Image (cartoon, rainbow, N blue to C red):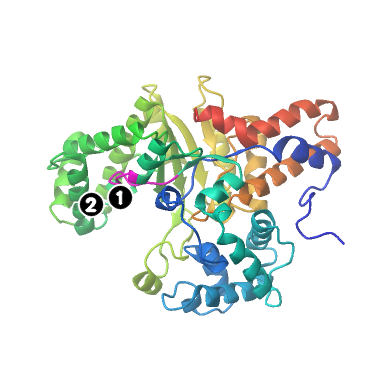
Amino acid sequence: MKNFIHDDFLLQTDAAKQLYHDHAKNQPIIDYHCHLNPEYIARDHSFDNLGQIWLEGDHYKWRAMRTNGIEEKYCTGKDTSDMEKYVKWAETVPYTMRNPLYHWTHLELKRAFGVDKLLKPETAQEIYDICTEKLRTPEYSARGLMKMFKVQVVCTTDDPADSLQHHIALKNEQFEVKVLPTWRPDKAMAVENPKVYREYVEKLAEVSGVTINRFDDLIEALRKRHDFFASVGCKLSDHGIEEFYAEPYTQNEIEQIFNKVYGGSELTWEEILKFKSAMLYEGALMDWEKGWTQQFHYGAIRNNNTRQFNKLGPDTGFDSIGDLNVAKAMSRFFDQLDKDNRLAKTIIYNLNPRDNEMVATMIGNFQDGSVAGKIQFGSGWWFLDQKTGMEAQMNSLSNLGLLSRFVGMLTDSRSFLSYPRHEYFRRILCNLIGNDVENGLLPVSEMDFLGKMVEDISYFNAKNFFNF
């Protein structure tokens, strides 16, 4: 009887197996969007035990545990031990069958620790002991795990006011894995709360050395920080937006709106939309000027549970898919930039699967032949970061664009054990193409080209697209 995670896991045909084992399996990893803590890499953090590395900050697991009837103290509790949390996670794992967490959990156990046993209460202690013992060796430090999984580049997610001290230290040390910052200016757009916004602007003024009294000052401060990020190796921006913003505005209107919110007054919804539109546009110009790639993650409704948000804060597992209609605003935003030929390389990630075909056709509107796949339909993100979601994204891209020019997978994770998600994606990709070959939808005589296509999507497209 085969182990659950075996050599041909998810590979249903001979063509799929050939594509994966000969072309995808051994490609290095470029993780161009993640939420790893750069300090952990800089000081080569070691993890005390399996519970710590697995459950610290993992809202995917927390959601599953809550749904399984596990008390909050075993998810985010400060007074609950790592072991106690791990035991409750082990109790939950069998109930995650058909959830991607079941696959991810066992891929991570197999690839990082060589553990073939299924995690459940009966095996929990044995697995914990094996993995914890290994985690306490140098090979399993933050850097050790990155090297274990053949990671070449990671791009973290960083606020414009961040010092980037850990990125700088790693650059100066010439650590073999490139650890680059990503420009994430969401807080500079977050004008819904005037008090919080003013505090942020004052922090930005301090780190940039620019006195901010008006909107133009804000943009100057951001430009200085943008230049600083570039000096540390940044090549990408990222925007976590609920929707695209492309409201018409005048410069005078934006100045008045900034003065109003900076002065402590609440903005109307129309004013918020205009300000966000101006900020998104100005940021896009900065990215274009430097040849960066801009990323847009849109469509999440965050912090839905007020009671839990007040108790636990953001990013604790109470977000969901939104259902806003964004096509017209998205089109206006990109067209506004493209009119002056100032549209940067772009990746769009949707959270609602109903938008797949819309995004796949939207990217075709702004391809200009200057770069292969200049406008990208990003991989299945967050709630769509699973087999069905990835297949749907790739099918839409295949039908309406060029899958062959796709820049592939990323972890979008805070965990150093998440790199098998690249393997998961590659197996799904190879199975998708391999099934087409077996069913006569793609020519078996072109296996060499299809192999090169798999290699490109797994690694080379991203390497060339981002100029890593």
Q: Tell me where residue 112 appears, x and y as whole percent.
A: 64, 55
Q: Nearer the viewer, residue 296 or 416?
A: 416
Query: Residue 44 appears at what percent x and percent y?
Result: 46, 51
Residue beneath disc 2: 200
Instruction: Give the quarter of the image for residue 314.
Output: bottom left
For image coordinates 24% across by 48% down, the residue present is 271
* Residue at 66% in and 60% down: 109
User: Does 266 appear above or below 209?
Assistant: below
Mark 2 surroundings: few (<14), some (14-19) or many (≥20) residues within 10 A:
some
Q: Name the side, left or right, on which 94 lies relative to 307.
A: right
For badge 2, the amino acid type reads: Tyr
Residue 163 in the magenta stretch? The answer is: yes
Residue depicted at 59% across the width and 49% down the height: 419
Packing grade of label 1 (10 A; few <14, some 14-19, many >=20) is: some
Kind of residue indicated by mark 1: Lys
Q: Quadrant of the N terminus?
A: bottom right
Q: Is any atom of residue 276 visible in this view?
A: yes
Residue 142 falls left or right of residue 341: right
> Label 2 near label 1: C-beta < 8 Å?
yes
Q: Secondary structure at mark 1?
A: helix
What is the spatial separation of the Cα atoms under label 1 and label 2, in whole angstroms?
Answer: 7 Å
**Residue 330 falls inside the magenta stretch:** no
User: Residue 442: x, y in percent?
Assistant: 80, 32
- Say what secondary structure mark 2 lies in: helix
- Per the image, the residue denoted by label 1 is 187
Please identify the dominant SS of the magenta region. loop
Which residues are the magenta region?
A: 156-165
